[in-house]
């Protein structure tokens, strides 16, 4: 059962071939037996999961089931979960137990899904390798047979690794600069970052409020569509949530792609992309041409400025958001502070990891008097230019296709002492977040035995088109079905 998709598991439960309790036990047993080598979970909620599975079986017996009733999944440990530790991968929140559910958490609970636990992540979602977590790095299931431990990508690396290792069929995730698409690509699964405002951020621990977006991770595009059906929608508790009708994202999955206009941004096929990676991406584009799509080159002229703009805006917002962790109200507090100043400084020095401190310092500097106009204001002007690039491109094409990352999963520790090299791992994903458009990663081949992801970028609120394009690709390829050895 652990090799089946969410859609297949739902049908198995509907037919009565297996109960939710049996299915949940199977996944819990796999987590116990296998996760020591991956470290993909921070918290496993075994007792609660089995209780929820029992309730789901009763609901199915009473004819009150949805697609998700009794289906196991996991939450990234950034979504507040009532009564369950929610840490954001940080010592600062290692003992934080929220008294409420995030909207995304509540939506899955209402749908009858069974949460197995909370997945590991880069601290406060800051990272591209899942090595900054207070709870230890996550190991990519791919590449272990060679003796090398590879990163799963970040910050949603725990969710991606757990799905790739078949410890869970699906998991929630968040994307601030590529944190869904990059780990999905490096772990050989399918991940979707929706349009900014499509999924409520209420109860999702903030990193950069104008960039953070909750999204989906699973093996197939169909499963991502089933997840988005639960997650998407307007929420009065979130001032950035968009009040717009939510379609059934599974309804258009099987529409043919004849006439689909695909654009290839020339800036994303540059010297920064390895030839082997480029070949896999271009091979995937050829499959779309066989399916009836037309392909043309387009330009995103300000794409080269995305990294610089992002690493001013995101740290600035992080500096503001993380100021609430002061040792006074909740979270970690240093022992025996001498005075209030000592409480603040030692709590933050001891509670935050190196990467979080680095970004707070950069962000505080960019927002300081005398530098605000030179850095933050200028970065926001560049952001507007990047957004206009996408608007112009979508006047010519329906979707854009590109690589997700410049190379496959790298060895753990390779970039930990070089922050700039780590930041450049997101070079093809960051512009999407600055513009707020939806994008996803789809498995599209292998380089040196490691997965490669194809990035599909869409116009605002056109997640259904992306899912349709990804699903049709997965009907004629089997990259998404490959298993790590």
Image: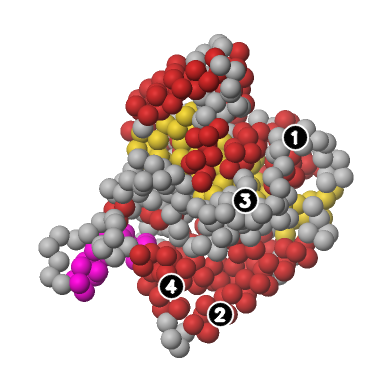
The local secondary structure at tag 3 comes to loop
| Residue 446 can be seen, yes or no | no
Is 242 left or right of 134, judged from the image as shown? right
Counting residues from the N terminus, which is met first, the one under dot 2 or under dot 4?
4
Residue 377, numbered circle? 2
Q: Which region of the structure is painted magenta?
A: 340-357
Counting residues from the N terminus, which is met first, the one under dot 2 or under dot 3?
3
Q: Residues within 10 Å of mark 2 (few under 14, many from 20)?
A: some
The image quadrant that residue 270 belongs to is: bottom right
CA–CA distance in space, label 1 to label 3: 20 Å
Residue under label 4? 363
Residue 251, numbered circle? 1
Mark 2 against mark 3, which lies toward the viewer? 3
Where is residue 317 drawn, in percent x and y?
A: 47, 68
Mark 4 against mark 1, which lies toward the viewer? 1
* Up/down of 148 relative to 331, above or below: above
Residue under label 3? 234
CA–CA distance in space, label 2 to label 1: 42 Å
The local secondary structure at tag 1 comes to loop
* Up/down of 67 relative to 418, above or below: above
Counting residues from the N terminus, which is met first, the one under dot 4 or under dot 1?
1
Magenta segment, prevailing SS (helix, strand or loop): helix
Q: Are marks 4 and 1 in contact (CB under 8 Å)?
A: no
Colour convention of the picture? secondary structure
Counting residues from the N terminus, which is met first, the one under dot 2 or under dot 1?
1
Query: Observer-nearest residue: 242 or 141?
Result: 242
Query: Which residue sits at x=36%, y=32%?
Result: 45
Where is residue 409 drawn, in percent x and y?
A: 49, 46
């Amino acid at each position: 059962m652990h090799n089946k998709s969410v859609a297949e598991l739902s049908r198995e439960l509907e037919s009565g071939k297996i109960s939710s309790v049996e299915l949940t036990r199977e996944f819990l047993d796999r987590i116990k037996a296998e996760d020591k080598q991956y470290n993909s979970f921070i918290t496993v909620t075994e007792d609660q999961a089995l209780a929820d599975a029992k309730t789901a079986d009763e609901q199915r017996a009473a004819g009150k089931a949805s697609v998700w009733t009794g289906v196991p999944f996991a939450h990234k440990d950034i979504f507040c979960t009532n009564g369950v530790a929610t840490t954001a991968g940080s010592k600062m929140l290692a003992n934080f137990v929220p008294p409420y559910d995030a909207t995304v958490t509540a939506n899955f609970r209402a749908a009858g899904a069974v949460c197995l636990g909370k997945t590991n992540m880069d601290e406060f979602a800051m990272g591209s390798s899942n090595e900054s977590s207070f709870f230890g790095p996550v190991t990519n299931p791919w590449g272990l047979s060679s003796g090398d431990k590879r990163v799963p990508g970040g910050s949603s690396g725990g969710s991606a690794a757990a799905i790739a290792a078949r410890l869970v069929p699906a998991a929630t995730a968040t994307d601030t600069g590529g944190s869904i698409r990059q780990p999905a690509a490096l772990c050989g699964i399918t991940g979707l970052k929706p349009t900014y405002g499509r999924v409520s951020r209420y109860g999702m621990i903030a990193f950069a409020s104008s960039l953070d977006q909750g999204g989906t991770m699973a093996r197939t595009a169909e499963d991502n569509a089933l997840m988005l059906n639960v997650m998407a929608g307007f929420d009065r508790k979130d001032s950035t949530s968009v009040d717009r009708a939510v379609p059934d994202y599974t309804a258009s999955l099987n529409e043919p792609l004849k006439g689909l206009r695909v654009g290839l941004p020339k800036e994303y096929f540059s010297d920064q992309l390895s030839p082997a990676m480029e070949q896999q991406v271009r091979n995937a584009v050829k499959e779309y041409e066989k399916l009836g799509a037309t392909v043309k080159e387009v330009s995103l002229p300000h794409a080269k400025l995305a990294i610089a703009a992002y690493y001013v805006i995101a740290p600035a917002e992080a500096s503001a958001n993380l100021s609430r962790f002061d040792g006074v109200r909740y979270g970690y507090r240093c022992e025996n502070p001498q005075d209030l100043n000592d409480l603040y400084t030692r709590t933050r020095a001891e509670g935050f990891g190196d990467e979080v401190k680095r970004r707070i310092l950069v962000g505080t500097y960019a927002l300081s008097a005398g530098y605000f106009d030179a850095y933050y204001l200028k970065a926001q002007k560049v952001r507007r230019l990047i957004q206009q690039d996408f608007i112009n491109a979508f006047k010519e094409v329906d979707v854009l296709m590109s690589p997700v990352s410049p190379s496959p999963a790298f060895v753990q520790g390779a970039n930990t002492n070089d922050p700039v090299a780590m930041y450049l791992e997101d070079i093809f994903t960051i512009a999407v977040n600055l513009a707020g458009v939806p994008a996803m990663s789809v498995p599209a081949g292998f380089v040196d035995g490691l997965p490669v992801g194809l990035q599909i970028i869409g116009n605002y609120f056109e997640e259904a088109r992306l899912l349709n394009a990804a699903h049709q690709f997965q009907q004629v390829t089997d990259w998404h079905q490959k298993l790590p050895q």
